[in-house]
Amino acid sequence: MLALVPVSDLDNVVIRVGLHIQPSRLRAVRDVARKARAIGGDLAAINVARDPETGAMVLFSGLHRLTAARLDGAETIAVRWFDDCATFAAAASDFDPYSGGGEAVPVAMLTSIQCDGSASRLESIRRAHRERAQLPPIRICKSGDRLLVHDGHHRLQIARELGHETIAVRWCTAC
């Protein structure tokens, strides 16, 4: 179930083992969140499940988005709730940007609100294109009349640079 939840309601959420804050990623997420809010959008939902043994709420993905919301004083955040951890695990492939698939969308229709990419990341994507590697679809969502990129800003930048007319996408339910 997807819901808009007060950020303060998540003060006691337990962070899944393996999730940790990366300062550079947090800065990028905060920058993207500010730009998204400026055009009436928001970031994709975080994923929370209830641990059946302890009853605790467990954050499975979205640590940087939740931290950015807290630091930036956001009142609410989109949360995708799961009844339990096993339900989340079973559904996780629906949210995995590396699970393949995707439909082709014209590059010109997409709005990327992340402006600068790291040179090393961009070069690794260029190299993958040269080697004809299969890259995962970018993740997008509709916000008003815009198609916003949630994940894949670097891949979109390289696709435009290389003159691609379309790019593989997967749709997010909240952006």
Image: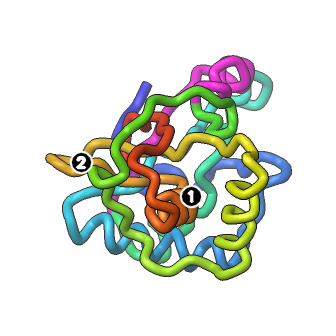
Q: On the picture, is 168 further left or further right than 54?
A: left
Residue 78 drawn in magenta: yes
Query: Measuring 44% from the left and 48% from the top, which residue is drawn there?
Result: 44
Res. 75 in view = yes
Q: Amino acid at mark 2?
A: Ser
Mark linked to residue 143: 2
The crowding category of the residue bearing disc 2, from other C-alpha atoms within 10 Å (few below 14, some 14 to 19, many at least 20), is some
Q: Secondary structure at mark 2?
A: strand
3D distance between C-alphas at marks 1 and 2: 20 Å
Q: Nearer the viewer, residue 44 or 158?
A: 158
In primary-sequence order, the first of circles 1 and 2 is 2
Res. 5 in view = no
Residue 68 drawn in magenta: no
Q: Could you tell me residue 102's position as x and y percent?
A: 52, 30
Q: Amino acid at mark 1?
A: Arg
Q: Could you tell me residue 143's position as x and y percent?
A: 24, 48
Q: Nearer the viewer, residue 168 or 35?
A: 168
| Quarter of the rendering occupied by the N terminus | top left
Start and end of the magenta stretch? 75-94
Query: Measuring 27% from the left and 50% from the top, which residue is drawn there?
Result: 109
Query: Measuring 75% from the left and 63% from the top, which residue is drawn there?
Result: 127
Q: Quadrant of residue 69?
A: bottom left
Q: Nearer the viewer, residue 159 or 16?
A: 159
Question: For mark 1, what is the residue?
Answer: 155
Residue located farthest toward the left when viewing the structure as drawn: 145
From what the image shows, is residue 144 above or below residue 34? above
Query: Measuring 68% from the left and 38% from the top, which residue is drawn there?
Result: 98
**Image mark count:** 2
Q: Could you tell me residue 53's position as x and y percent?
A: 79, 24
Front disc: 1 or 2: 1
Q: Nearer the viewer, residue 36 or 115?
A: 115
Q: On the picture, is 9 further left or further right than 175?
A: right
